[in-house]
Structures are given as C-alpha cells and as structure tokens.
Amino acid sequence: MLILLFFSWLFYGAIHSLMASNYFKNFVAEKMGKYVRFYRLFYNVIAFVLLIPVLALQFSTEKNTLWQVSDYEAISGKFISVLGTIFIAIALQGYDLGEFSGIHFKKQDEIPAFKTDGLLQYVRHPIYFGILLLFWGLFVADASTKSLLGAIAVTIYLLIGVYFEEKKLVLVFGEKYKAYQKNVPMLIPFLRF
C-alpha cells in the first residue's frame, strides 16, 4: 500500500507538471481554439479532482510509526505544518486569485506582470515552500511511513516542477528573471537554495 501511495503522489505530480508545460498548453490551445481562455480553470479542476483519490489513499493507508513521537516532536511538527499553511495563505494573497484559479480570463498572448513584492522578495516560490513545510511538519508530528513517503514524493515533485517552472519564467521574463534568480533564493528563504 505504501508503494502505491508513493507512486500515486508521483503520478499526480507528473500529470500536474505535464498539464502546466508549454508543450501541453500549446497542444490544448490548438484543440480548444477560442476556448483556450478556459484552460487555467480546466487545469485547476483536473488538478483538484485528481488530488482527491491521492489524499483519500494518504488518509486511508495504515499508519506505521518509525519511532515513538514525543510530545515536543508532535507539537513542533504541527506548528511547522500550520506555519506552512499560513505561508501558503499569505503567498496566495500576492496573486490575482481570480486569474490564478482560472475564473478571470486573460488573453492568451497577454504577459503576466513580473512581481517581486510580498513573500516573493524572500523566496521565488513561496507556495512551494509552504507546501514543503506542511508535508514535512506532518512527518515530524507523527513519524509515520505514510507521512514520510508523502513528504518525499511531494519534495521530488516540487523540485522537478520548480526546475521546469524556472525555465518557463526565464522564457517569459528574460534577463529580469535571471537577475531575480541571482538575488532571491528558489525554495528556502534566506538560503541559497
């Protein structure tokens, strides 16, 4: 069951990344024609629907602990997870949530604004950082094999996703983004990573 859980997370990440790729977007744009403006909404609905069975598997998998968690570890892990959730919520405030969700449509050739304010001045991918805190905090809180596998799979997915996302951002914003890469950490605030 743990192997299935691990590969479910990786499969979800692969589908999510494929759908976010320029190659897939361009393919869909050819097929959808004028309806391509609905792509972001379609992408988010599919991502949400595909996440449901993965989360169901995550929560239904038997909990085998790797060691007995102390009260301090449990509290620390929950604190880290809550901090990650707060970080995600603050990061989302820096985006146009209507556009981010796909509810508000933009023209396909419209270039998004290059933003470096809010949490983006400390880390290039604040939502991903929050997700890492959330998942690794869950592992610290319960030290279970399923939490560890979930955290490892999500970390692998995010590292691969960030690699491709960075390439897209360099294509869109060019030298401006390259300078930003040199000055702001990718995933962990205040570290050169």
Image: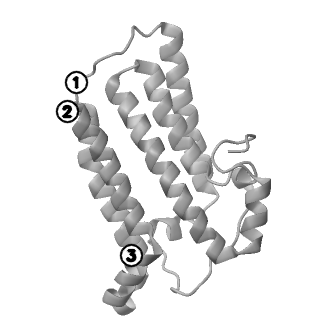
Q: Are marks 1 and 2 in contact (CB under 8 Å)?
A: yes
Please name whichever residue, 166 or 41, is drawn nearer the observer in this view of the structure: 166
Tell me if mark 1 has few (under 14), some (14-19) or many (20+) residues whose alpha carbon lies within 10 angstroms of its own: few
Determine whether, in the image, residue 149 is placed left or right of residue 190: left
Q: For residue 59, what is the image quadrant?
A: top left
Give the mark toward the camera: 1 or 2: 2
Q: Amino acid at mark 3?
A: Phe
User: In percent of the image, x 49 and y 31: which residue is there?
Assistant: 136
SS label for mark 2: loop
SS label for mark 1: loop
User: Pointer 1: what residue?
Assistant: 62
Q: Amino acid at mark 1?
A: Glu
User: In percent of the image, x 39 and y 41: which residue is there?
Assistant: 153
Residue 57 visible in the shown view: no
User: Pointer 2: what residue?
Assistant: 1
Give the distance between the C-alpha atoms of the residues marked 1 and 2, in whole angstroms.
8 Å
Tell me where residue 156 appears, x and y as whole percent. Answer: 45, 45
User: Pointer 3: what residue?
Assistant: 24
Residue 115 visible in the shown view: yes
> Along the polypeptide, which appears first: circle 1 or circle 2?
2
Q: Are marks 1 and 3 in contact (CB under 8 Å)?
A: no
Tell me if mark 2 has few (under 14), some (14-19) or many (20+) residues whose alpha carbon lies within 10 angstroms of its own: few
